[in-house]
Image (cartoon, grey):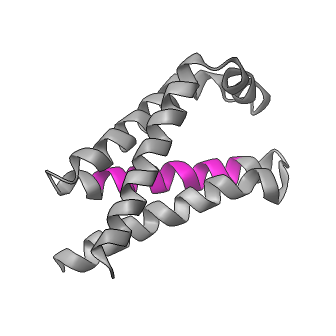
């Protein structure tokens, strides 16, 4: 796979998760979504996980094991987010971003594993 493409995906994912992690702390709209989903007690944990994953992907350019850990963690987080969106009947349009980020981070993870095996 083209290394440049993977790096662009990693940067895109990292920036996205840093942005969404910050929104988890500061956005009233995001806070109300967690209430609507009935998981407001997990908002801070999710925000921290998103920030750690985003920064982990960036650090992974210098310390590769962070790419493994961050992409794995973000894949799990987004799979759970997708399942939650389906469970609260948000529909495919509102559920698709979590599926999209699940696929991106799973792709990053599998590419990393392919390169070390």
In the displayed structure image, the side of residue 102 where residue 64 appears, left or right: left
Question: Which is nearer the eye, 98 or 39?
Answer: 98
101 is higher (above) or lower (below) than 112: above
Question: Which is nearer the eye, 86 or 56?
Answer: 56
Residue at 67%, 29% in the rendered image: 39
Is 78 inside the magenta-drawn segment?
A: yes
Residue at 22%, 52% in the rendered image: 60
Question: Which is nearer the eye, 61 or 81?
Answer: 61
In the displayed structure image, the side of residue 106 where residue 31 appears, left or right: right
* Residue 114, quarter of picture: bottom left
Is 71 inside the magenta-drawn segment?
A: yes
Q: Quadrant of the C terminus?
A: bottom left
22 is higher (above) or lower (below) than 15: above
Q: Quadrant of the N terminus?
A: bottom left
Q: Which residues are magenta?
A: 69-84
Q: Position of residue 89 (x, y in %)?
A: 85, 49
Dominant SS in magenta: helix
Q: Position of residue 51 (x, y in %)?
A: 40, 34
* Residue 116, quarter of picture: bottom left
21 is higher (above) or lower (below) than 104: above
């Amino acid at each position: 796979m083209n290394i440049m493409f993977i790096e662009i995906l990693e940067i895109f994912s990292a920036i996205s998760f840093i942005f969404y992690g910050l929104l988890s702390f500061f956005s009233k709209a995001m806070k109300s979504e967690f209430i609507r989903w009935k998981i407001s007690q997990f908002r801070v944990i999710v925000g921290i996980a998103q920030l750690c994953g985003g920064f982990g992907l960036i650090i992974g350019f210098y310390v590769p094991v962070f790419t493994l850990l961050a992409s794995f963690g973000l894949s799990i987080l987004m799979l759970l987010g997708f399942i939650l969106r389906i469970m609260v009947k948000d529909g495919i349009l509102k559920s698709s971003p979590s599926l999209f980020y699940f696929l991106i981070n799973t792709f990053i993870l599998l590419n990393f594993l392919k390169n070390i095996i």
